[in-house]
Image (spheres, rainbow, N blue to C red):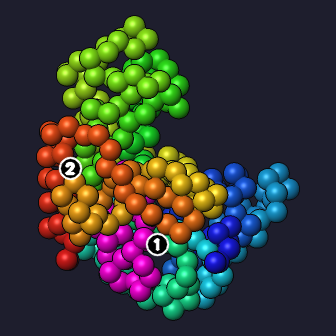
C-alpha cells in the first residue's frame, strides 16, 4: 500500500489550496505535492506554505508534474473550470470539465495507478463517474466529496435553529451535490431525538421553516459565489475530514459520491448515500431510513444525473 500521508493535489486554485492548508495545519500529511498547469502558481503556493513549517511541523511541500505522484497514496483532484457565474449550475460545467479529466486520468493511471482518488471538482458526481470510467483503478478507489459539504451546511443551520452544537446534530443531504439534492428530514435528530414532531430545546420546526432551510442548503453555493466569487474553506475542511477517515481506517459513515449498485433501486449512477469509508476507499453504501417522498426525490436526483453520465 502506498503512503496515505503522501498526498497529491491536482489543481492549486481556491479549493485545492484550502484543502492543502487544512491538511498541512492539521498535520495530516508528511508530503504535499502540488500539480497544476500553471507551474509558477503551484511553485509559489508550495514555497509560501512551506515557510510555516516551524509553526506546524515538518511537511515536505513541492510543486511538480504528475510523475512526482508515483508514491502518493491519495490524490485529490480539484482541477477544472469553476462556475462562471452564480446562476451556472454544477451540471452545466460538465462539458467544459470532462476534457480536463480525460487528460488527468491518463496521467494518473501512468504515474500513480495505485493511489486512491478523491474528486472535488464540480459537477462532482458526474466527474467522479467519469473518472471511474476513464481510470483503470477499481470504482471503490475513486470517491467524490459528494454531499458532505451540503450535509455540514444542513447540520449547521439546524444547530443554529435549535441553539445547540453542530456536533450534536445528525442529519444528511443525499443524492446529487447540486440542485436536485435532498435534505433528509425523516431521520434528522438532535441528541438522538427526531426533529419531526418533537420539541427540542424549547423549539419545534414546522413545514414552512423546513422548506426555507432546505432552500438555504441547496442555494448555499450560489449565495456564496454571488458574494465572494467562489467557495473554498468549508469544502477544504470537508476534504480533510474524508482524508482523515481514509488514513486512520476509521470505517466512518460519510455521505460521499460513490457508484450505486442497486441501493434504493438505483443502479449505475454515482451520487451520495451514507458510505462506509476506510483505507481502501468505499466498502459499502448504507441508505438508512428515508420516507417515501425523500426516496422519490433521490430517484429523481439519480434521473437527473443519468442524463449526463454518458456525455
Residue 146 rendering spot, x and y as whole percentages: 38, 56
Q: Which residue is drawn at 42% across and 70% down?
A: 140
Q: Does the magenta stretch include residue 136?
A: yes
Q: Residue at x 45, y 63 (%)?
A: 283
**Nearest to N terminus: mark 2 or mark 1:** 1
Task: Name which quarter of the figure residue 216 lies in.
Answer: top left
Query: What range is drawn magenta here?
Result: 125-147
Structural crowding at the residue carrying mark 2, measured as other residues with C-alpha within 10 Å and reported as few (<14), some (14–19) or many (≥20): many
Residue 17 rendering spot, x and y as whole percentages: 57, 60
Query: Is residue 97 found left or right of 5 in the rendered image?
Result: left
Q: Which residue lies furthest to the top in this view?
A: 202
Quadrant where the N terminus sits is: bottom right
Query: Is residue 284 found left or right of 298 in the rendered image?
Result: right
Q: Distance between the residues labelled 2 and 1?
A: 24 Å
Check the image and report above or below for 47 versus 35: above
Residue beneath label 2, please? Answer: 298
Q: In this rendering, does residue 161 appear at all?
A: yes
Give the numbered dot on residue 141: 1
Task: Name which quarter of the figure residue 21 lies in.
Answer: bottom right
**Pointer 2 with pointer 1, Cβ within 8 A:** no
Quadrant where the C terminus sits is: bottom left
Tag count in the figure? 2
Query: Is residue 97 found left or right of 91 in the rendered image?
Result: right
Query: Is residue 133 found left or right of 45 in the rendered image?
Result: left
- Please name whichever residue, 214 or 251, is drawn nearer the observer in this view of the structure: 251
Q: Residue at x 39, y 42 (%)?
A: 151
Residue 45 rendering spot, x and y as whole percentages: 65, 66
Residue 58 rendering spot, x and y as whole percentages: 82, 63
Q: Residue furthest right?
A: 54
- Please name whichever residue, 129 or 274, is drawn nearer the observer in this view of the structure: 274
Q: Residue furthest bottom?
A: 110
- Disc 2 secondary structure class: helix
Amino acid at each position: 500500500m502506498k503512503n496515505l500521508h503522501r498526498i497529491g493535489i491536482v489543481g492549486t486554485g481556491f479549493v485545492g489550496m484550502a484543502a492543502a492548508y487544512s491538511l498541512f495545519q492539521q498535520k495530516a500529511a508528511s508530503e504535499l505535492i502540488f500539480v497544476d498547469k500553471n507551474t509558477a502558481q503551484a511553485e509559489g503556493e508550495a514555497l509560501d506554505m512551506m515557510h510555516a513549517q516551524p509553526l506546524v511541523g515538518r511537511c515536505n511541500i513541492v510543486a511538480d508534474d504528475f510523475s512526482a505522484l508515483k508514491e502518493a497514496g491519495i490524490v485529490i483532484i480539484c482541477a477544472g473550470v469553476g462556475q462562471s457565474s452564480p446562476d451556472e449550475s454544477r451540471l452545466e460545467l460538465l462539458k467544459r470539465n470532462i476534457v480536463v479529466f480525460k487528460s488527468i486520468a491518463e496521467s494518473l493511471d501512468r504515474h500513480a495507478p495505485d493511489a486512491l482518488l478523491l474528486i472535488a471538482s464540480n459537477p462532482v458526481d458526474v466527474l467522479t463517474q467519469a473518472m471511474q470510467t476513464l481510470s483503470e483503478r477499481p470504482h471503490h478507489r475513486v470517491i467524490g466529496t459528494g454531499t458532505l459539504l451540503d450535509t455540514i451546511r444542513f447540520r449547521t443551520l439546524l444547530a443554529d435553529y435549535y441553539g445547540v452544537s453542530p456536533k450534536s446534530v445528525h442529519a444528511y443531504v443525499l443524492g446529487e451535490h447540486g440542485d436536485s439534492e435532498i435534505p433528509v428530514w425523516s431521520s434528522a435528530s438532535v441528541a438522538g431525538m427526531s426533529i419531526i414532531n418533537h420539541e427540542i430545546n424549547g423549539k419545534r420546526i414546522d413545514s414552512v421553516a423546513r422548506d426555507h432551510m432546505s432552500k438555504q442548503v441547496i442555494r448555499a453555493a450560489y449565495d456564496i459565489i454571488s458574494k465572494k466569487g467562489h467557495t473554498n474553506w468549508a469544502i477544504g475542511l470537508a476534504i480533510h475530514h474524508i482524508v482523515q477517515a481514509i488514513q486512520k481506517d476509521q470505517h466512518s459513515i460519510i455521505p460521499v459520491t460513490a457508484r450505486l449498485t442497486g441501493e434504493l433501486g438505483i443502479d449505475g449512477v454515482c451520487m451520495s448515500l451514507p458510505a462506509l469509508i476506510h483505507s481502501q476507499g468505499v466498502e459499502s453504501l448504507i441508505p438508512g431510513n428515508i420516507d417515501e417522498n425523500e426516496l422519490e426525490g433521490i430517484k429523481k436526483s439519480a434521473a437527473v444525473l443519468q442524463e449526463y453520465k454518458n456525455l
